Image: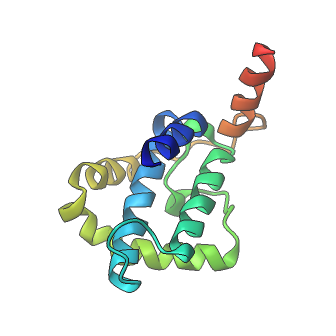
Amino acid sequence: MVLQSQRQLDEILSGELLKEYKTVHAMIKIYCAKHHGVLHGLCEECAELSEYAKTKLDRCVFGQNKPTCNRCPVHCYRPEPKETMRAVMRFSGPRMLFKHPLLAIRHLRHEKKEVPEVPKKNVSNRHLRKQVKSEKQ
C-alpha cells in the first residue's frame, strides 16, 4: 500500500515540488504524532491537510521554481488550512532538525533563494503533466 501511494505521488509531483512535499509531509507527521497521538501514519484531519498541500503544490503557478510558502507572493491556501499549516510549521519547524535534518537544511537553504516573478500562465506542474499526457495520446 505504501509503495503504491509513493508511486502515485511520483507520478504527480517530481523534482523540487516532490522535495517540498516530502518536507511538508514530514512536518505534518511530527505535528500529528504530538497533537493527535498518531505514531504511524496520519489521522484523518492531518491526512486531508497533507493531500491539500499536495494539490496546492501540483497547481502552484511557479511550477518547479516555486519559492517557499512564507515568501510566496501568491497566497493559494484557503484561510482555514492556511492557519492549520502555519501551526504545523511553527511547531514542527524546530523539530525537523532532529527528525529530518537533510530536509530541514534543504528547506532553510531554499528559503534564502530569491523569489521569482509571478509567471504569466501554464507553468504549473498540473498543466505541464496534462500537456505531456495529451502529447502521448
- As displayed, is residue 85 above or below residue 103? below
Display coloring: rainbow
- Which residue is depicted at the point 55% across and 44% down? 66
- Which residue is depicted at the point 70% across and 34% down? 123
Q: Position of residue 42 (x, y in %)?
A: 45, 69
- As displayed, is residue 135 above or below residue 97? above
Q: Position of residue 108 (x, y in %)?
A: 32, 54
Q: Nearer the viewer, residue 69 or 112?
A: 69
- Which residue is depicted at the point 38% across and 85% down? 35
Q: Residue furthest top?
A: 136
Q: Position of residue 27 (x, y in %)?
A: 38, 65
In the shown orientation, is residue 102 left or right of residue 65?
left
In the shown orientation, is residue 9 left or right of residue 26?
right
In the shown orientation, is residue 20 left or right of residue 93?
right
Marker count (numbered): 0
Q: Residue furthest left?
A: 98
- As displayed, is residue 124 above or below residue 29? above
Looking at the rendering, which quadrant does residue 97 occupy?
Answer: bottom left
Q: Nearer the viewer, residue 51 or 44?
A: 44
Q: Position of residue 14 (x, y in %)?
A: 52, 34
- Which residue is depicted at the point 33% across and 81% down? 34
